[in-house]
Image (tube, rainbow, N blue to C red):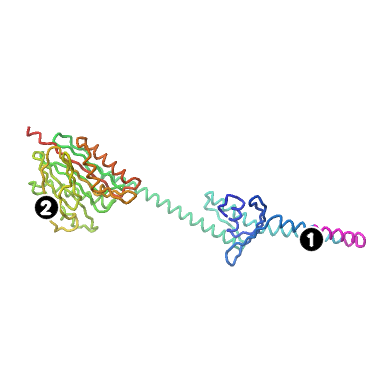
């Protein structure tokens, strides 16, 4: 009834729920009814009776007619025998009527005035004046309701103060996260080399303000290029801090290599370093590769990471990385290196599991098969930036409206050839 499109019915229902009592004239289906209602205090209900107006007025008209007939007979008798008594009786009746209306008016005022005060006070509170206090002392449910409203305003003021503090704290944290995201992005290399003997491009799209993935590339000397991709456990600020440590440790050990055969030792030493003082039990999957730009020899070590794709002219296959452990778990785990030889035009594609584990609303993963099919149908002569952007769009189309749940990081390297041979 409170949700009725008829405002009279909705208003009556709200008054019944509020514990009021009254008699109202309402219209239902083009008929007039009297609705009488009053609270049942012992059970907390409101009892209402609905009667057609015609039925009520019919009885009133009948009684009125009977009274009129009786009064005419009575007046006739009075006029004949008791003129003086009739005058006194009429005067007495008038006094009773005046007294009745006076008492009724006083009783009505006693009932409605607290309700009016309550209504006015509630409107003032609703307008935003939370310092307003209702001063009603009727000793009944109206006084209890006014007390409840006063308590509600106090609680609202406390809630708004807490909300203001929480909002300010949220803005502070959001600002710090934005700064952390900016610092993290600045740690990733963005100036990709423009050279004739190879092409390289990488992207990182974090699922949150700060991510747990990273990529890296750098030269050991003029002929050896190192590429790295990693995925850390967890997200947010802890993962970002562990990312910075992992990236620094891996690069420092790689730069200290004396021969290409030391790449496996680089991963072993980095793992031992990350295991020390790792109270949060964070870990990282890593793939590190080193390309000899003169010979095309590609030495790589995998630390529990996804197998990269190696794309030749007509087909793409997953690189054989074998079984390996993630870094940061067990400092005694050894890491071994493998190597292949790239031909001119071959491409190595590194990625994190945010690519293959992107999920749509049917809980279907993008998967390794779709990734392999994507690269098999691409024109490898296009710029790597274009190809990676196309792959990212393909992943977004697969996910649809599902929110990104993991960082998506990709790095592609195309070996052209050693131009000094010519």
Q: Which quadrant is the C terminus positioned in?
A: top left
**Eye-nearest disc, 1 or 2:** 2
- Residue 310 position, x and y percent, is 17, 44
Residue 298's spot in the image, x, y percent? 12, 44
- Left or right, 187 with reference to 25: left
Principal secondary structure, stretch drawn in magenta: helix
Where is residue 194 drawn, in percent x and y?
18, 34
Q: Is residue 373 magenta?
A: no
Kindly indicate the quadrant of the structure image that contains residue 198. top left
Q: Which residues are magenta?
A: 65-86
Front-most of residues 126 and 359: 359
Q: Secondary structure at mark 1?
A: helix
Tag of residue 245: none
Q: Secondary structure at mark 2?
A: loop
- Residue 174 position in % (x across, y down): 34, 47
Quadrant into which the N terminus falls: bottom right
Q: Residues within 10 Å of mark 2 (few under 14, many from 20)?
A: some
Q: Is residue 23 left or right of residue 178?
A: right
Residue assigned mark 1 = 96
Q: In 3D space, how far apart are the residues under numbered discs 1 and 2 (Cα atoms)? A: 112 Å
Q: Nearer the viewer, residue 267 or 410?
A: 410
Q: In the visual, does 201 lie left or right of 261?
A: right
Residue at the limit of the structure toward the bottom, as seen here: 42
Return the disc, 1 or 2, that comes first in the chain's sequence.
Answer: 1
Q: Quarter of the image holding residue 42?
A: bottom right
Q: Which residue is mark 2?
A: 336
Q: Nearer the viewer, residue 19 or 71?
A: 71
Query: Which residue is at the far right?
Result: 80
Does residue 75 show up magenta in the picture? yes
Q: Residue at x 46, y 55 (%)?
A: 158
Nearer to the camera, 92 or 230: 230
């Amino acid at each position: 009834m409170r949700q009725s499109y008829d405002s009279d019915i909705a208003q009556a229902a709200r008054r019944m729920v509020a514990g009021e009592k009254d008699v109202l004239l309402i219209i239902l289906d083009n008929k007039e009814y009297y609705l009488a209602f009053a609270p049942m205090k012992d059970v907390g209900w409101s009892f209402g009776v609905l009667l057609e107006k015609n039925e009520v007025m019919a009885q009133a008209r009948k009684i009125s007619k009977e009274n009129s007939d009786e009064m005419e007979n009575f007046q006739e008798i009075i006029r004949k025998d008791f003129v003086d008594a009739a005058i006194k009786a009429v005067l007495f009746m008038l006094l009773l009527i005046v007294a009745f209306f006076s008492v009724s008016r006083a009783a009505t005022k006693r009932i409605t005035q607290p309700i009016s005060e309550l209504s006015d006070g509630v409107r003032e509170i609703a307008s935003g004046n939370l310092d307003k206090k209702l001063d009603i002392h009727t000793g009944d449910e109206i006084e209890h309701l006014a007390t409840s409203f006063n308590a509600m305003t106090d609680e609202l003021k406390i809630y708004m103060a807490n909300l203001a503090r929480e909002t300010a704290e949220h803005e502070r944290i959001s600002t710090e996260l934005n700064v952390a995201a900016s610092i993290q992005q600045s740690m990733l290399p963005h100036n990709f080399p423009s050279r004739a003997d190879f092409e390289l491009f990488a992207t990182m799209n974090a699922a949150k303000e700060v991510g747990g993935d990273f990529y890296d590339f750098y030269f050991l000397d003029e002929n050896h290029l190192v590429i790295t991709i990693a995925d850390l456990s967890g997200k947010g600020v802890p993962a970002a801090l562990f990312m910075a440590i992992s990236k620094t440790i891996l690069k420092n050990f790689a730069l200290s290599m004396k021969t290409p055969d030391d790449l496996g030792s680089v991963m072993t030493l980095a793992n031992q370093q990350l295991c020390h003082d790792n109270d949060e039990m964070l870990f990282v999957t890593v793939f590190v590769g080193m390309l000899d730009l003169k010979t095309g020899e590609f030495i790589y070590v995998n630390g529990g990471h996804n197998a990269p794709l190696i794309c030749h002219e007509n087909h793409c296959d997953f690189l054989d990385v074998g079984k390996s452990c993630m870094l940061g778990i067990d400092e005694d785990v050894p890491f071994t290196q493998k190597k292949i030889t790239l031909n001119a035009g071959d491409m190595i594609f590194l990625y994190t599991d945010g690519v293959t584990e992107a999920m749509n609303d049917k809980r279907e993963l993008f998967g390794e098969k779709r990734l392999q099919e994507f690269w098999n149908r691409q024109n490898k002569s296009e710029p790597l930036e274009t190809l990676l952007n196309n792959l990212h769009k393909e992943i977004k189309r697969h996910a649809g409206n599902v929110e990104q749940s993991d960082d998506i990081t990709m790095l592609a390297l195309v070996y052209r050839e050693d131009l000094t041979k010519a």
